């Protein structure tokens, strides 16, 4: 009988190594096969069912950043991820997060099966056409004329203007609202809001001014304010009411004016066919009038937030060119820019802040709707109680 040869130590080591490698391969196959079948508790298909779907690959979580996963819609539209998924390559790693995989699987299944292409609200490559018409909204004494003069140097107004009213560029013949000062006591109704939401061709420039500075200007130039001592003597009425009652208001202190009723003539009579006439044309005070106009502008913000630019007068006066350049960049208005346009300089007249007495400041804090003001970038600190000289 032949003797059994002794095992060579080297052969034994190689055999053991091959056995370990084989077991490791088997373990990987088992792990890969078992990971997805138990991941269908949310109603999504098992891995064995997923290869027949339009996509069959899960993404390595190293490829997913905050921008990629900002929403399910964003994840479904990331070209980088789409290429990996539809390339059929397996990027699953042991540290893949099952919850994240479920999110991606849901988003991508929706995008593939429904053939829906979602768009990120700020992604220019898939954006609809940018605005082609510009209109200004803002209350009297807010700086709308100044804003119009700045815009007119850069862009062509969309409205037809009477040669005697060139200051109303971007300000009249406005769809739905008719006029920049929004002469109406009621808020926009559902029909009007739906019409505004469909006018994505319009860029709305909302011009505002610090509330107490604005109120002081309304006292000096009370545009269209009905007779303060006898509202019914002016309103309703066919005779135009400008700011002839400014002399009457001189007998009132600023504190008294802030609590004075405001009758609005254009809302009581049809102002050049640009008003919405109403019986409710009297406001408790000038700040209630302001709140109403801000509410109207807030309705537009809510309906078409992407097509709105809020312009604060004190910032515009400091740098009108900054506003123009921001509009060009944000709303893709290069094609609307006038030929040979030249950068604009800061305003020669810049309004100073209104200093309030203790009494005036307390009235302002009580009467101003600061929650509404916050939507336009103002806080209670924008009404200034100044120190007096000793």
Image (cartoon, grey):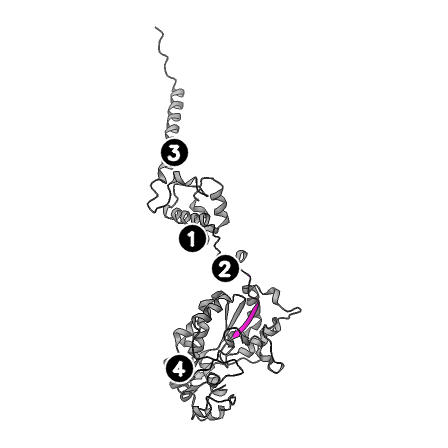
Q: Which residue is mark 2?
A: 122
Q: Which residue is mark 3?
A: 29
Residue at the right extreme? 340
Determine if the magenta segment contains residue 23: no
Q: Residues within 10 Å of mark 2 (few under 14, many from 20)?
A: few
Distance CA(mark 2)–CA(mark 3): 43 Å
Q: Which residue is mark 4?
A: 364
Reading the chain from its start, which is encountered first: label 2 or label 3?
A: 3
Q: Is residue 33 above or below residue 232?
A: above
Observer-nearest of 14 and 222: 222
Q: Which residues are magenta?
A: 129-136
Determine if the magenta segment contains residue 132: yes
Distance CA(mark 4)–CA(mark 2): 38 Å
Residue 254 position, x and y percent, is: 43, 88
Q: Nearer the viewer, mark 3 or mark 1?
A: 1
Mark 3: secondary structure = helix
């Amino acid at each position: 009988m032949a003797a059994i040869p002794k095992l060579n130590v080297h052969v034994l080591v190689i055999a053991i190594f091959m056995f370990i490698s084989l077991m490791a391969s088997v373990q990987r196959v088992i792990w890969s096969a078992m990971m997805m079948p138990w991941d269908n508790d949310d109603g999504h298909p098992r891995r064995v069912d997923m290869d027949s779907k339009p996509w069959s690959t899960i993404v390595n979580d190293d490829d997913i950043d905050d921008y990629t996963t900002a929403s399910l819609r964003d994840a479904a539209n990331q070209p980088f991820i789409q290429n990996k998924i539809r390339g059929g390559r397996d990027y699953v790693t042991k540290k893949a997060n099952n919850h994240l995989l479920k999110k991606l699987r849901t988003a991508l299944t929706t995008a593939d099966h429904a053939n829906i292409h979602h768009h990120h609200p700020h992604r220019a490559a898939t954006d609809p056409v940018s605005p082609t018409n510009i209109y200004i909204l803002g209350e009297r004494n807010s700086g709308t004329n100044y804003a119009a003069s700045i815009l007119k140097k850069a862009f062509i107004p969309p409205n037809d203007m009477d040669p005697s009213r060139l200051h109303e560029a971007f300000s009249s013949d406005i769809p739905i609202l008719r006029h920049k000062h929004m002469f109406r006591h009621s808020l926009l109704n559902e029909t009007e809001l739906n019409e505004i939401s469909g006018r994505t061709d319009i860029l709305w420039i909302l011009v505002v001014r610090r509330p107490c500075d604005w109120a002081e200007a309304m006292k000096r130039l009370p545009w269209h304010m009905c007779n303060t001592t006898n509202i019914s003597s002016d309103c309703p009425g066919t005779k135009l009411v400008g700011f002839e009652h400014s002399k009457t208001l001189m007998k009132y202190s600023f504190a008294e004016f802030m609590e004075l009723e405001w009758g609005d003539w254009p809302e009581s009579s049809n102002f050049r066919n640009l008003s919405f006439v109403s019986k409710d044309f009297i406001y408790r005070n000038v700040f209630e009038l302001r709140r109403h106009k801000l509410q109207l502008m807030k309705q537009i913000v809510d309906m078409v937030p992407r097509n709105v630019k809020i312009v604060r007068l004190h910032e515009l006066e400091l740098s009108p060119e900054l506003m123009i350049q921001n509009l060009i960049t944000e709303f893709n208005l290069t094609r609307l820019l006038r030929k040979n346009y030249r950068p604009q300089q800061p305003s020669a007249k810049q309004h100073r802040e209104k200093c309030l007495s203790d009494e005036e400041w307390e009235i302002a804090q009580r009467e101003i709707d600061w929650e509404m003001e916050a939507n336009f970038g103002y806080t209670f600190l924008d009404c200034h109680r100044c120190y007096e000289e000793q």
